[in-house]
Amino acid sequence: MKAASAWPIYRRLLRYARPYIGVFLIGVLGMLLFSATQSALAYLVKRFFNGAFVVRDPKILWEIPLGVVVLFALRGIGDYVANYYPSWVGRQVVKGLRRDVFSHYLRLPTAYLDRQQSGHLLSKLTNNIELVAGAATTAAIALIGDSLTLIGLLAYLFYLNWRLALFCVAAAPVIGWLMQIANRSFRRYSTRIQNSMGDITRVAKEAIDAHRLIKIFNAEDHQTERFERVNELNRASNMKLIRAKAISNPVVQVIAAIALASVLYVSIRQVFLHDMRVDEFIGFLTALMLIPESLRSLVNVGGPLQQGVAAGQSVFELLDQPTEGTGGTRPISRARGEIEFRNVSFTYGSEKGPVLHDVSFHVRPGETVAIVGRSGSGKTTLVGLVPRFYDVQQGQVLLDGVDVREYRLHDLRAQVSLVSQDVVLFNDTIRNNIAFNAIEKTDAEVEAAARAANVMEFVALQPHGFDTLLNDRGQNISGGQRQRISIARALLKDSPVLILDEATAALDNESERRVQQELSLLMEGRTTLVIAHRLSTVEGADRIIVLDEGRIVETGNHRGLLARGGLYAALHGMQFNA
Ligand SMILES: Nc1ncnc2c1ncn2[C@@H]1O[C@H](COP(=O)(O)OP(=O)(O)OP(=O)(O)O)[C@@H](O)[C@H]1O
Ligand SMILES: [Mg+2]
Protein backbone atom coordinates (compact mmCIF):
# COMPACT_ATOMS: atom_id res chain seq x y z
CA MET A 1 0.00 0.00 0.00
CA LYS A 2 1.39 3.35 -0.99
CA ALA A 3 1.27 6.49 1.08
CA ALA A 4 -1.27 7.85 -1.40
CA SER A 5 -3.79 5.18 -0.44
CA ALA A 6 -3.19 5.65 3.29
CA TRP A 7 -4.58 9.16 3.34
CA PRO A 8 -8.16 8.30 2.30
CA ILE A 9 -8.24 5.69 5.05
CA TYR A 10 -7.02 8.14 7.60
CA ARG A 11 -9.50 10.72 6.39
CA ARG A 12 -12.28 8.21 6.74
CA LEU A 13 -11.13 7.54 10.28
CA LEU A 14 -11.18 11.23 10.99
CA ARG A 15 -14.78 11.31 9.85
CA TYR A 16 -15.63 9.25 12.93
CA ALA A 17 -13.88 11.86 15.05
CA ARG A 18 -15.54 14.83 13.39
CA PRO A 19 -18.52 15.12 15.78
CA TYR A 20 -16.04 15.59 18.62
CA ILE A 21 -13.87 18.15 16.88
CA GLY A 22 -14.50 20.67 19.67
CA VAL A 23 -13.15 18.33 22.31
CA PHE A 24 -10.19 17.54 20.12
CA LEU A 25 -9.44 21.22 19.70
CA ILE A 26 -9.23 21.57 23.48
CA GLY A 27 -6.55 18.91 23.26
CA VAL A 28 -4.79 20.92 20.57
CA LEU A 29 -4.79 23.92 22.91
CA GLY A 30 -3.06 21.70 25.43
CA MET A 31 -0.50 20.75 22.81
CA LEU A 32 0.05 24.40 22.00
CA LEU A 33 0.63 25.15 25.66
CA PHE A 34 3.00 22.22 25.98
CA SER A 35 5.02 23.13 22.91
CA ALA A 36 5.18 26.78 23.97
CA THR A 37 6.76 25.69 27.25
CA GLN A 38 9.45 23.84 25.30
CA SER A 39 10.55 26.99 23.50
CA ALA A 40 10.12 28.95 26.71
CA LEU A 41 12.55 26.57 28.36
CA ALA A 42 15.22 27.45 25.82
CA TYR A 43 14.43 31.12 26.39
CA LEU A 44 14.73 30.68 30.15
CA VAL A 45 18.14 29.08 29.77
CA LYS A 46 19.25 31.94 27.52
CA ARG A 47 17.98 34.46 30.05
CA PHE A 48 19.73 32.68 32.85
CA PHE A 49 23.06 32.84 31.02
CA ASN A 50 22.45 36.43 30.07
CA GLY A 51 21.64 37.42 33.66
CA ALA A 52 24.34 35.30 35.25
CA PHE A 53 27.28 35.88 32.95
CA VAL A 54 26.58 38.71 30.53
CA VAL A 55 24.80 41.54 32.40
CA ARG A 56 25.01 40.05 35.93
CA ASP A 57 21.43 40.93 36.85
CA PRO A 58 20.57 40.01 40.51
CA LYS A 59 16.86 39.79 39.61
CA ILE A 60 17.40 36.40 38.04
CA LEU A 61 18.01 34.95 41.49
CA TRP A 62 14.24 34.86 41.94
CA GLU A 63 13.11 35.08 38.40
CA ILE A 64 14.71 31.91 37.08
CA PRO A 65 13.67 29.42 39.84
CA LEU A 66 10.16 30.86 39.82
CA GLY A 67 10.15 30.68 36.04
CA VAL A 68 11.14 27.03 36.15
CA VAL A 69 8.29 26.13 38.53
CA VAL A 70 5.67 28.07 36.57
CA LEU A 71 6.96 26.67 33.32
CA PHE A 72 6.74 23.08 34.47
CA ALA A 73 3.32 23.62 36.01
CA LEU A 74 2.06 24.97 32.68
CA ARG A 75 3.79 22.17 30.88
CA GLY A 76 2.02 19.65 33.12
CA ILE A 77 -1.36 21.19 32.43
CA GLY A 78 -0.63 21.21 28.72
CA ASP A 79 0.46 17.60 28.84
CA TYR A 80 -2.69 16.52 30.66
CA VAL A 81 -5.05 18.38 28.36
CA ALA A 82 -3.15 17.21 25.28
CA ASN A 83 -3.53 13.58 26.35
CA TYR A 84 -6.90 13.44 28.00
CA TYR A 85 -9.13 15.13 25.43
CA PRO A 86 -7.83 13.50 22.25
CA SER A 87 -7.94 10.13 24.02
CA TRP A 88 -11.54 10.81 24.95
CA VAL A 89 -12.23 11.40 21.28
CA GLY A 90 -10.33 8.21 20.46
CA ARG A 91 -12.55 6.10 22.71
CA GLN A 92 -15.63 7.62 21.09
CA VAL A 93 -14.21 6.66 17.70
CA VAL A 94 -13.62 3.10 18.91
CA LYS A 95 -17.14 2.87 20.24
CA GLY A 96 -18.68 4.32 17.10
CA LEU A 97 -16.65 2.09 14.85
CA ARG A 98 -17.47 -0.99 16.92
CA ARG A 99 -21.15 -0.20 16.80
CA ASP A 100 -21.04 0.24 13.02
CA VAL A 101 -19.03 -2.91 12.43
CA PHE A 102 -21.26 -4.97 14.69
CA SER A 103 -24.48 -3.81 13.14
CA HIS A 104 -22.92 -4.27 9.72
CA TYR A 105 -22.12 -7.90 10.55
CA LEU A 106 -25.76 -8.50 11.29
CA ARG A 107 -26.83 -7.18 7.92
CA LEU A 108 -24.30 -8.98 5.78
CA PRO A 109 -25.70 -11.57 3.38
CA THR A 110 -25.65 -15.20 4.55
CA ALA A 111 -23.55 -16.11 1.53
CA TYR A 112 -20.82 -13.68 2.59
CA LEU A 113 -20.83 -14.82 6.21
CA ASP A 114 -20.63 -18.46 5.08
CA ARG A 115 -17.28 -17.69 3.46
CA GLN A 116 -15.77 -15.80 6.41
CA GLN A 117 -13.78 -17.16 9.29
CA SER A 118 -15.54 -16.07 12.45
CA GLY A 119 -12.21 -15.64 14.26
CA HIS A 120 -11.14 -13.05 11.76
CA LEU A 121 -14.44 -11.23 12.02
CA LEU A 122 -14.11 -11.19 15.81
CA SER A 123 -10.55 -10.01 15.68
CA LYS A 124 -11.57 -7.09 13.52
CA LEU A 125 -14.13 -6.08 16.08
CA THR A 126 -11.72 -6.33 19.00
CA ASN A 127 -8.08 -6.00 17.99
CA ASN A 128 -8.20 -4.02 14.76
CA ILE A 129 -10.56 -1.38 16.04
CA GLU A 130 -8.36 -0.93 19.09
CA LEU A 131 -5.41 -0.21 16.83
CA VAL A 132 -7.51 2.25 14.91
CA ALA A 133 -7.95 4.15 18.15
CA GLY A 134 -4.18 4.26 18.46
CA ALA A 135 -3.95 5.98 15.11
CA ALA A 136 -6.78 8.33 15.84
CA THR A 137 -5.40 9.50 19.17
CA THR A 138 -1.85 8.67 20.22
CA ALA A 139 -0.65 9.27 16.72
CA ALA A 140 -2.66 12.44 16.33
CA ILE A 141 -1.40 13.73 19.67
CA ALA A 142 2.20 13.10 18.72
CA LEU A 143 1.74 14.27 15.17
CA ILE A 144 0.14 17.58 16.07
CA GLY A 145 1.83 18.09 19.42
CA ASP A 146 5.36 17.33 18.29
CA SER A 147 4.94 19.24 15.06
CA LEU A 148 3.86 22.25 17.10
CA THR A 149 6.83 21.82 19.40
CA LEU A 150 9.17 21.54 16.44
CA ILE A 151 7.66 24.60 14.81
CA GLY A 152 8.02 26.53 18.06
CA LEU A 153 11.62 25.48 18.54
CA LEU A 154 12.51 26.18 14.92
CA ALA A 155 10.90 29.59 15.08
CA TYR A 156 12.99 30.35 18.15
CA LEU A 157 16.13 29.16 16.39
CA PHE A 158 15.39 31.39 13.42
CA TYR A 159 14.73 34.28 15.75
CA LEU A 160 18.07 33.81 17.48
CA ASN A 161 20.20 33.25 14.43
CA TRP A 162 18.49 32.63 11.12
CA ARG A 163 21.62 31.70 9.20
CA LEU A 164 22.53 29.00 11.66
CA ALA A 165 18.92 27.82 11.79
CA LEU A 166 18.82 27.52 8.03
CA PHE A 167 21.90 25.38 8.21
CA CYS A 168 20.13 23.04 10.67
CA VAL A 169 17.04 22.78 8.56
CA ALA A 170 19.13 21.42 5.70
CA ALA A 171 19.14 18.09 7.54
CA ALA A 172 15.35 17.85 7.35
CA PRO A 173 15.01 16.14 3.93
CA VAL A 174 17.29 13.31 5.01
CA ILE A 175 15.22 12.72 8.11
CA GLY A 176 12.00 12.91 6.13
CA TRP A 177 13.29 10.31 3.70
CA LEU A 178 14.22 7.99 6.55
CA MET A 179 10.79 8.39 8.08
CA GLN A 180 9.15 7.38 4.84
CA ILE A 181 11.14 4.18 4.60
CA ALA A 182 10.35 3.36 8.21
CA ASN A 183 6.64 3.99 7.74
CA ARG A 184 6.43 1.70 4.77
CA SER A 185 7.82 -1.26 6.66
CA PHE A 186 5.75 -0.40 9.75
CA ARG A 187 2.60 -0.74 7.73
CA ARG A 188 3.59 -3.96 6.02
CA TYR A 189 4.40 -5.63 9.33
CA SER A 190 1.28 -4.23 10.97
CA THR A 191 -0.99 -5.83 8.41
CA ARG A 192 0.77 -9.12 8.97
CA ILE A 193 0.40 -8.84 12.72
CA GLN A 194 -3.29 -8.12 12.45
CA ASN A 195 -3.89 -11.08 10.18
CA SER A 196 -2.02 -13.31 12.56
CA MET A 197 -4.09 -11.96 15.47
CA GLY A 198 -7.14 -13.04 13.50
CA ASP A 199 -5.65 -16.52 13.14
CA ILE A 200 -4.97 -16.70 16.86
CA THR A 201 -8.55 -15.79 17.69
CA ARG A 202 -9.87 -18.27 15.17
CA VAL A 203 -7.78 -21.23 16.33
CA ALA A 204 -8.43 -20.45 20.00
CA LYS A 205 -12.15 -20.06 19.44
CA GLU A 206 -12.38 -23.33 17.55
CA ALA A 207 -10.45 -25.13 20.22
CA ILE A 208 -12.57 -23.72 23.02
CA ASP A 209 -15.79 -24.56 21.20
CA ALA A 210 -14.61 -28.07 20.44
CA HIS A 211 -13.24 -28.97 23.85
CA ARG A 212 -15.07 -32.28 24.05
CA LEU A 213 -14.03 -33.32 20.57
CA ILE A 214 -10.43 -32.51 21.41
CA LYS A 215 -10.58 -34.57 24.59
CA ILE A 216 -12.05 -37.68 23.00
CA PHE A 217 -9.55 -37.55 20.15
CA ASN A 218 -6.70 -36.84 22.57
CA ALA A 219 -5.99 -33.96 20.23
CA GLU A 220 -4.50 -31.58 22.79
CA ASP A 221 -1.01 -31.80 21.30
CA HIS A 222 -2.32 -31.49 17.79
CA GLN A 223 -4.29 -28.38 18.70
CA THR A 224 -1.34 -26.96 20.62
CA GLU A 225 0.81 -27.40 17.54
CA ARG A 226 -1.79 -25.70 15.41
CA PHE A 227 -1.93 -22.87 17.87
CA GLU A 228 1.84 -22.72 18.07
CA ARG A 229 2.06 -22.11 14.32
CA VAL A 230 -0.16 -19.03 14.37
CA ASN A 231 1.36 -17.94 17.65
CA GLU A 232 4.86 -18.12 16.19
CA LEU A 233 3.77 -16.26 13.07
CA ASN A 234 2.38 -13.53 15.28
CA ARG A 235 5.58 -13.36 17.30
CA ALA A 236 7.75 -13.23 14.20
CA SER A 237 5.66 -10.47 12.63
CA ASN A 238 5.73 -8.52 15.86
CA MET A 239 9.50 -8.87 16.07
CA LYS A 240 9.87 -7.47 12.57
CA LEU A 241 7.85 -4.45 13.59
CA ILE A 242 9.79 -4.09 16.82
CA ARG A 243 13.05 -4.29 14.90
CA ALA A 244 11.92 -1.68 12.39
CA LYS A 245 10.89 0.60 15.25
CA ALA A 246 14.06 -0.06 17.21
CA ILE A 247 16.30 0.62 14.22
CA SER A 248 14.55 3.81 13.23
CA ASN A 249 15.33 5.43 16.59
CA PRO A 250 19.11 5.18 16.69
CA VAL A 251 19.40 5.94 12.99
CA VAL A 252 17.51 9.17 13.44
CA GLN A 253 19.60 9.94 16.50
CA VAL A 254 22.87 9.40 14.69
CA ILE A 255 21.74 11.55 11.79
CA ALA A 256 20.67 14.20 14.27
CA ALA A 257 24.05 13.94 16.01
CA ILE A 258 25.85 14.45 12.71
CA ALA A 259 23.68 17.46 12.02
CA LEU A 260 24.33 18.74 15.52
CA ALA A 261 28.07 18.29 15.11
CA SER A 262 28.11 20.39 11.95
CA VAL A 263 25.98 23.01 13.66
CA LEU A 264 28.37 23.08 16.59
CA TYR A 265 31.29 23.50 14.25
CA VAL A 266 29.67 26.44 12.48
CA SER A 267 28.34 28.07 15.63
CA ILE A 268 31.55 27.74 17.60
CA ARG A 269 33.27 29.50 14.73
CA GLN A 270 30.65 32.24 14.94
CA VAL A 271 31.26 32.58 18.67
CA PHE A 272 34.99 32.90 17.98
CA LEU A 273 34.26 35.56 15.39
CA HIS A 274 32.11 37.36 18.02
CA ASP A 275 29.02 37.14 15.78
CA MET A 276 27.20 35.45 18.65
CA ARG A 277 26.86 36.20 22.36
CA VAL A 278 27.29 33.38 24.87
CA ASP A 279 23.66 33.44 26.06
CA GLU A 280 22.45 33.37 22.48
CA PHE A 281 24.70 30.47 21.81
CA ILE A 282 23.47 28.56 24.87
CA GLY A 283 19.82 29.38 24.10
CA PHE A 284 20.30 28.20 20.56
CA LEU A 285 21.97 25.02 21.70
CA THR A 286 19.23 24.30 24.24
CA ALA A 287 16.50 24.68 21.66
CA LEU A 288 18.49 22.55 19.26
CA MET A 289 18.95 19.82 21.87
CA LEU A 290 15.20 19.72 22.45
CA ILE A 291 14.57 19.04 18.77
CA PRO A 292 15.69 15.37 18.55
CA GLU A 293 13.25 14.34 21.29
CA SER A 294 10.26 15.72 19.41
CA LEU A 295 11.67 14.44 16.19
CA ARG A 296 11.99 10.99 17.65
CA SER A 297 8.42 10.81 18.83
CA LEU A 298 7.39 12.13 15.43
CA VAL A 299 9.25 9.25 13.80
CA ASN A 300 7.86 6.78 16.32
CA VAL A 301 4.36 7.87 15.54
CA GLY A 302 4.83 6.04 12.27
CA GLY A 303 4.31 2.72 14.07
CA PRO A 304 0.89 3.28 15.64
CA LEU A 305 -0.20 5.42 12.72
CA GLN A 306 0.59 2.77 10.17
CA GLN A 307 -0.89 0.09 12.40
CA GLY A 308 -4.02 2.13 12.64
CA VAL A 309 -4.17 2.69 8.91
CA ALA A 310 -3.66 -1.01 8.19
CA ALA A 311 -6.32 -1.90 10.74
CA GLY A 312 -8.61 0.81 9.44
CA GLN A 313 -8.24 -0.56 5.95
CA SER A 314 -9.39 -4.03 6.94
CA VAL A 315 -12.24 -2.60 9.00
CA PHE A 316 -13.39 -0.36 6.17
CA GLU A 317 -13.15 -3.20 3.68
CA LEU A 318 -15.66 -4.98 5.84
CA LEU A 319 -17.87 -1.93 6.20
CA ASP A 320 -17.81 -1.59 2.42
CA GLN A 321 -19.20 -5.08 1.94
CA PRO A 322 -22.72 -4.61 0.62
CA THR A 323 -25.41 -5.60 3.10
CA GLU A 324 -28.39 -7.65 2.13
CA GLY A 325 -30.46 -4.49 2.05
CA THR A 326 -34.09 -4.12 2.97
CA GLY A 327 -35.50 -6.28 0.20
CA GLY A 328 -38.42 -5.17 -1.91
CA THR A 329 -40.95 -2.49 -1.19
CA ARG A 330 -44.07 -4.55 -0.72
CA PRO A 331 -45.34 -4.60 2.87
CA ILE A 332 -47.09 -7.60 4.35
CA SER A 333 -48.48 -7.88 7.86
CA ARG A 334 -49.73 -11.44 8.00
CA ALA A 335 -49.46 -13.82 5.07
CA ARG A 336 -52.06 -16.46 4.31
CA GLY A 337 -49.16 -18.83 4.01
CA GLU A 338 -49.37 -20.02 0.44
CA ILE A 339 -45.92 -21.04 -0.77
CA GLU A 340 -44.91 -21.84 -4.29
CA PHE A 341 -41.59 -22.85 -5.79
CA ARG A 342 -41.60 -22.22 -9.52
CA ASN A 343 -38.78 -23.86 -11.53
CA VAL A 344 -36.26 -23.03 -8.85
CA SER A 345 -32.61 -23.76 -9.50
CA PHE A 346 -30.03 -22.77 -6.95
CA THR A 347 -26.28 -22.97 -6.60
CA TYR A 348 -24.13 -21.86 -3.64
CA GLY A 349 -20.98 -20.96 -5.48
CA SER A 350 -19.89 -21.01 -9.06
CA GLU A 351 -17.38 -23.79 -8.42
CA LYS A 352 -20.06 -26.22 -7.22
CA GLY A 353 -22.82 -27.49 -9.44
CA PRO A 354 -26.42 -26.53 -8.73
CA VAL A 355 -27.81 -27.84 -5.44
CA LEU A 356 -31.44 -27.53 -6.55
CA HIS A 357 -32.58 -28.27 -10.09
CA ASP A 358 -35.83 -26.98 -11.49
CA VAL A 359 -37.82 -27.50 -8.30
CA SER A 360 -41.53 -26.74 -8.51
CA PHE A 361 -44.25 -27.35 -5.96
CA HIS A 362 -47.15 -25.57 -4.41
CA VAL A 363 -48.28 -25.51 -0.77
CA ARG A 364 -51.76 -24.34 0.10
CA PRO A 365 -52.25 -22.15 3.16
CA GLY A 366 -52.42 -24.31 6.27
CA GLU A 367 -51.07 -27.38 4.55
CA THR A 368 -48.34 -29.51 6.10
CA VAL A 369 -45.77 -30.65 3.60
CA ALA A 370 -42.90 -32.94 4.46
CA ILE A 371 -39.63 -32.86 2.61
CA VAL A 372 -37.60 -36.02 2.79
CA GLY A 373 -34.54 -37.28 1.05
CA ARG A 374 -31.02 -38.47 1.62
CA SER A 375 -28.50 -36.36 3.45
CA GLY A 376 -27.15 -33.63 1.19
CA SER A 377 -30.11 -33.80 -1.17
CA GLY A 378 -30.85 -30.10 -0.66
CA LYS A 379 -33.64 -30.01 1.93
CA THR A 380 -32.16 -27.36 4.21
CA THR A 381 -31.14 -25.33 1.19
CA LEU A 382 -34.67 -25.47 -0.16
CA VAL A 383 -36.42 -24.22 2.95
CA GLY A 384 -33.79 -21.51 3.44
CA LEU A 385 -34.95 -19.87 0.24
CA VAL A 386 -38.30 -18.95 1.76
CA PRO A 387 -36.93 -16.40 4.30
CA ARG A 388 -34.34 -15.39 1.69
CA PHE A 389 -31.18 -16.60 3.41
CA TYR A 390 -30.15 -16.95 -0.20
CA ASP A 391 -31.74 -15.86 -3.44
CA VAL A 392 -32.49 -18.21 -6.28
CA GLN A 393 -30.54 -17.91 -9.51
CA GLN A 394 -33.38 -19.22 -11.62
CA GLY A 395 -37.09 -19.45 -11.08
CA GLN A 396 -39.10 -17.93 -8.27
CA VAL A 397 -40.14 -18.55 -4.70
CA LEU A 398 -43.55 -17.08 -4.02
CA LEU A 399 -45.38 -16.33 -0.80
CA ASP A 400 -49.10 -15.65 -1.24
CA GLY A 401 -48.51 -15.55 -4.99
CA VAL A 402 -45.86 -12.81 -4.82
CA ASP A 403 -42.14 -13.29 -5.39
CA VAL A 404 -40.41 -13.18 -1.99
CA ARG A 405 -37.96 -10.65 -3.41
CA GLU A 406 -40.76 -8.14 -3.74
CA TYR A 407 -41.54 -8.06 -0.02
CA ARG A 408 -39.75 -5.96 2.50
CA LEU A 409 -37.18 -8.30 3.97
CA HIS A 410 -38.21 -7.50 7.53
CA ASP A 411 -41.86 -8.25 6.77
CA LEU A 412 -41.04 -11.42 4.88
CA ARG A 413 -38.96 -12.84 7.70
CA ALA A 414 -41.66 -11.98 10.20
CA GLN A 415 -43.86 -14.52 8.37
CA VAL A 416 -41.53 -17.43 8.96
CA SER A 417 -40.70 -19.39 12.10
CA LEU A 418 -37.77 -21.69 11.73
CA VAL A 419 -36.46 -24.48 13.90
CA SER A 420 -33.15 -25.17 12.29
CA GLN A 421 -31.06 -28.29 12.26
CA ASP A 422 -28.41 -26.80 14.51
CA VAL A 423 -29.83 -25.29 17.65
CA VAL A 424 -28.56 -21.88 18.64
CA LEU A 425 -28.91 -20.72 22.23
CA PHE A 426 -27.77 -17.57 23.93
CA ASN A 427 -25.99 -17.10 27.20
CA ASP A 428 -29.22 -16.07 28.89
CA THR A 429 -32.13 -17.46 30.88
CA ILE A 430 -34.42 -20.16 29.50
CA ARG A 431 -37.21 -17.60 29.39
CA ASN A 432 -35.17 -15.12 27.36
CA ASN A 433 -34.00 -17.85 25.06
CA ILE A 434 -37.59 -18.71 24.29
CA ALA A 435 -38.78 -15.13 24.13
CA PHE A 436 -35.91 -14.14 21.86
CA ASN A 437 -36.56 -10.63 20.56
CA ALA A 438 -40.11 -10.93 21.83
CA ILE A 439 -40.22 -8.83 24.99
CA GLU A 440 -43.83 -7.93 24.26
CA LYS A 441 -44.95 -11.52 24.92
CA THR A 442 -46.57 -12.19 28.28
CA ASP A 443 -45.40 -14.86 30.67
CA ALA A 444 -48.53 -16.85 29.88
CA GLU A 445 -47.70 -16.87 26.19
CA VAL A 446 -44.13 -17.93 26.85
CA GLU A 447 -45.36 -20.71 29.09
CA ALA A 448 -47.89 -21.89 26.52
CA ALA A 449 -45.15 -22.15 23.90
CA ALA A 450 -42.91 -23.89 26.40
CA ARG A 451 -45.66 -26.37 27.26
CA ALA A 452 -46.33 -27.17 23.61
CA ALA A 453 -42.67 -27.85 23.04
CA ASN A 454 -42.49 -30.02 26.15
CA VAL A 455 -40.07 -27.64 27.79
CA MET A 456 -42.05 -27.27 31.02
CA GLU A 457 -41.30 -30.73 32.35
CA PHE A 458 -37.57 -30.12 32.54
CA VAL A 459 -37.88 -26.44 33.42
CA ALA A 460 -39.66 -27.59 36.58
CA LEU A 461 -36.59 -29.61 37.49
CA GLN A 462 -34.15 -26.73 37.02
CA PRO A 463 -33.06 -24.92 40.18
CA HIS A 464 -34.29 -21.53 39.01
CA GLY A 465 -37.05 -22.68 36.68
CA PHE A 466 -37.50 -20.36 33.74
CA ASP A 467 -34.80 -18.10 35.05
CA THR A 468 -32.13 -20.77 34.86
CA LEU A 469 -29.17 -19.40 33.02
CA LEU A 470 -28.04 -21.36 29.96
CA ASN A 471 -24.42 -20.99 29.05
CA ASP A 472 -23.66 -20.20 25.45
CA ARG A 473 -24.25 -23.17 23.20
CA GLY A 474 -26.44 -24.46 26.03
CA GLN A 475 -23.96 -26.99 27.30
CA ASN A 476 -25.62 -27.29 30.68
CA ILE A 477 -28.74 -28.96 29.27
CA SER A 478 -29.26 -32.00 27.10
CA GLY A 479 -29.41 -32.03 23.31
CA GLY A 480 -33.13 -32.84 23.32
CA GLN A 481 -33.79 -30.08 25.83
CA ARG A 482 -31.96 -27.61 23.64
CA GLN A 483 -34.04 -28.67 20.71
CA ARG A 484 -37.27 -28.27 22.67
CA ILE A 485 -36.28 -24.75 23.65
CA SER A 486 -35.70 -23.87 20.04
CA ILE A 487 -39.09 -25.32 19.12
CA ALA A 488 -40.71 -23.24 21.84
CA ARG A 489 -38.96 -20.17 20.51
CA ALA A 490 -40.29 -20.76 17.00
CA LEU A 491 -43.80 -21.45 18.30
CA LEU A 492 -43.84 -18.26 20.31
CA LYS A 493 -43.07 -16.28 17.20
CA ASP A 494 -46.50 -17.38 15.98
CA SER A 495 -46.02 -16.79 12.29
CA PRO A 496 -48.10 -18.15 9.40
CA VAL A 497 -45.25 -20.23 8.01
CA LEU A 498 -43.49 -22.78 10.20
CA ILE A 499 -40.36 -24.59 9.06
CA LEU A 500 -39.14 -27.53 11.08
CA ASP A 501 -35.75 -28.77 9.91
CA GLU A 502 -35.06 -31.97 11.84
CA ALA A 503 -36.70 -30.24 14.76
CA THR A 504 -37.35 -33.36 16.77
CA ALA A 505 -34.38 -35.45 15.70
CA ALA A 506 -32.73 -35.28 19.12
CA LEU A 507 -35.83 -36.40 21.03
CA ASP A 508 -36.62 -39.91 22.15
CA ASN A 509 -39.61 -41.58 20.54
CA GLU A 510 -41.94 -40.84 23.40
CA SER A 511 -41.05 -37.16 23.73
CA GLU A 512 -41.13 -36.83 20.00
CA ARG A 513 -44.64 -38.24 19.85
CA ARG A 514 -45.77 -35.84 22.56
CA VAL A 515 -44.16 -32.86 20.87
CA GLN A 516 -45.65 -34.00 17.58
CA GLN A 517 -49.12 -34.04 19.09
CA GLU A 518 -48.73 -30.55 20.41
CA LEU A 519 -47.18 -29.42 17.19
CA SER A 520 -49.97 -30.80 15.09
CA LEU A 521 -52.41 -28.66 17.09
CA LEU A 522 -50.22 -25.65 16.42
CA MET A 523 -49.83 -26.48 12.76
CA GLU A 524 -53.55 -25.88 12.34
CA GLY A 525 -53.94 -22.75 10.31
CA ARG A 526 -50.24 -22.57 9.57
CA THR A 527 -48.35 -23.64 6.55
CA THR A 528 -45.73 -26.06 7.71
CA LEU A 529 -42.68 -27.44 5.98
CA VAL A 530 -41.25 -30.40 7.90
CA ILE A 531 -37.94 -31.99 7.20
CA ALA A 532 -37.25 -35.29 8.90
CA HIS A 533 -35.07 -38.29 8.41
CA ARG A 534 -37.15 -40.34 10.81
CA LEU A 535 -39.97 -41.05 8.43
CA SER A 536 -42.42 -42.05 11.14
CA THR A 537 -42.73 -38.37 12.02
CA VAL A 538 -43.89 -37.32 8.56
CA GLU A 539 -46.47 -40.02 7.94
CA GLY A 540 -49.24 -37.67 8.94
CA ALA A 541 -48.21 -34.90 6.55
CA ASP A 542 -50.74 -33.83 3.94
CA ARG A 543 -48.12 -34.34 1.30
CA ILE A 544 -44.60 -35.66 1.13
CA ILE A 545 -42.03 -34.36 -1.33
CA VAL A 546 -39.09 -36.63 -1.98
CA LEU A 547 -35.92 -34.85 -2.96
CA ASP A 548 -32.92 -36.52 -4.52
CA GLU A 549 -29.78 -34.70 -5.60
CA GLY A 550 -31.69 -31.45 -5.71
CA ARG A 551 -34.58 -32.73 -7.81
CA ILE A 552 -38.10 -33.65 -6.78
CA VAL A 553 -38.38 -37.31 -7.62
CA GLU A 554 -41.73 -38.16 -6.01
CA THR A 555 -44.69 -36.46 -4.38
CA GLY A 556 -47.70 -37.89 -2.67
CA ASN A 557 -49.01 -39.01 0.70
CA HIS A 558 -47.50 -41.71 2.82
CA ARG A 559 -49.69 -44.55 1.53
CA GLY A 560 -49.44 -43.51 -2.09
CA LEU A 561 -45.66 -43.25 -1.97
CA LEU A 562 -45.28 -46.61 -0.25
CA ALA A 563 -47.50 -48.20 -2.87
CA ARG A 564 -45.38 -46.62 -5.60
CA GLY A 565 -42.33 -48.50 -4.48
CA GLY A 566 -39.89 -45.68 -5.34
CA LEU A 567 -37.22 -43.88 -3.31
CA TYR A 568 -39.56 -43.11 -0.42
CA ALA A 569 -40.58 -46.73 -0.12
CA ALA A 570 -36.91 -47.72 -0.22
CA LEU A 571 -35.95 -45.22 2.50
CA HIS A 572 -38.93 -46.32 4.55
CA GLY A 573 -38.09 -49.98 4.11
CA MET A 574 -34.55 -49.38 5.35
CA GLN A 575 -35.78 -47.68 8.52
CA PHE A 576 -38.42 -50.19 9.46
CA ASN A 577 -36.85 -53.45 8.45
CA ALA A 578 -33.65 -52.66 10.25
N1 LIG B 1 -23.52 -22.78 2.89
C1 LIG B 1 -23.21 -23.64 1.93
N2 LIG B 1 -22.27 -23.32 1.03
C2 LIG B 1 -21.94 -24.18 0.04
N3 LIG B 1 -22.52 -25.37 -0.12
C3 LIG B 1 -23.45 -25.76 0.76
C4 LIG B 1 -23.85 -24.91 1.82
N4 LIG B 1 -24.80 -25.54 2.55
C5 LIG B 1 -24.98 -26.72 1.94
N5 LIG B 1 -24.19 -26.88 0.86
C6 LIG B 1 -24.18 -28.02 -0.07
O1 LIG B 1 -25.46 -28.12 -0.66
C7 LIG B 1 -25.89 -29.46 -0.71
C8 LIG B 1 -27.24 -29.59 -0.04
O2 LIG B 1 -27.10 -29.30 1.33
P1 LIG B 1 -28.33 -29.25 2.32
O3 LIG B 1 -27.84 -28.75 3.61
O4 LIG B 1 -29.42 -28.51 1.67
O5 LIG B 1 -28.69 -30.79 2.41
P2 LIG B 1 -29.81 -31.49 3.32
O6 LIG B 1 -30.69 -32.21 2.41
O7 LIG B 1 -30.39 -30.53 4.26
O8 LIG B 1 -28.91 -32.56 4.08
P3 LIG B 1 -29.10 -33.13 5.58
O9 LIG B 1 -30.20 -34.10 5.54
O10 LIG B 1 -27.80 -33.81 5.84
O11 LIG B 1 -29.36 -31.98 6.47
C9 LIG B 1 -24.80 -30.29 -0.10
O12 LIG B 1 -24.07 -30.89 -1.15
C10 LIG B 1 -23.96 -29.32 0.65
O13 LIG B 1 -22.62 -29.70 0.58
MG1 LIG C 1 -30.26 -30.27 6.27
Image: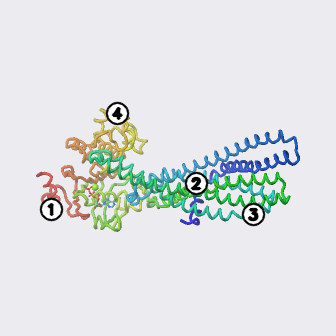
* N-term mark: 1 or 2: 2
Location of mark 3 (residue) = 167
Give me the disc on residue 465.
4
Q: Is residue 480 left or right of residue 429?
A: left
The span from disc 1 to disc 4 (Cα, nearest Å) is 48 Å
Kindly identify the amino acid type of the residue bearing the numbered disc 1: Gly
Q: Sort mark 4 into few (<14), some (14-19) or many (20+) by Cα contacts within 10 Å.
A: some
The span from disc 3 to disc 1 (Cα, nearest Å) is 95 Å
Q: Under tag 3, what secondary structure? A: helix
Q: Which quadrant would residue 463 be assigned to in this image?
A: top left
| Residue at the outermost left position | 577
The answer to whether one can see residue 106 in this image is: no
Mark toward the viewer: 3 or 4: 3
The answer to whether one can see residue 124 in this image is: yes
Kindly identify the amino acid type of the residue bearing the numbered disc 3: Phe
Question: Between 319 and 577, which is closer to the camera in this rendering?
Answer: 319
**In the image, residue 347 above or below residue 199:** below
The span from disc 1 to disc 2 (Cα, nearest Å) is 66 Å
Kindly identify the amino acid type of the residue bearing the numbered disc 2: Ala
Q: Under tag 2, what secondary structure? A: helix
Location of mark 2 (residue) = 135
**In the image, residue 151 above or below residue 210:** below
* N-term mark: 3 or 4: 3
Q: Is residue 198 left or right of residue 522?
A: right
Image coords of residue 48 (percent x, y): 81, 46
* N-term mark: 3 or 2: 2
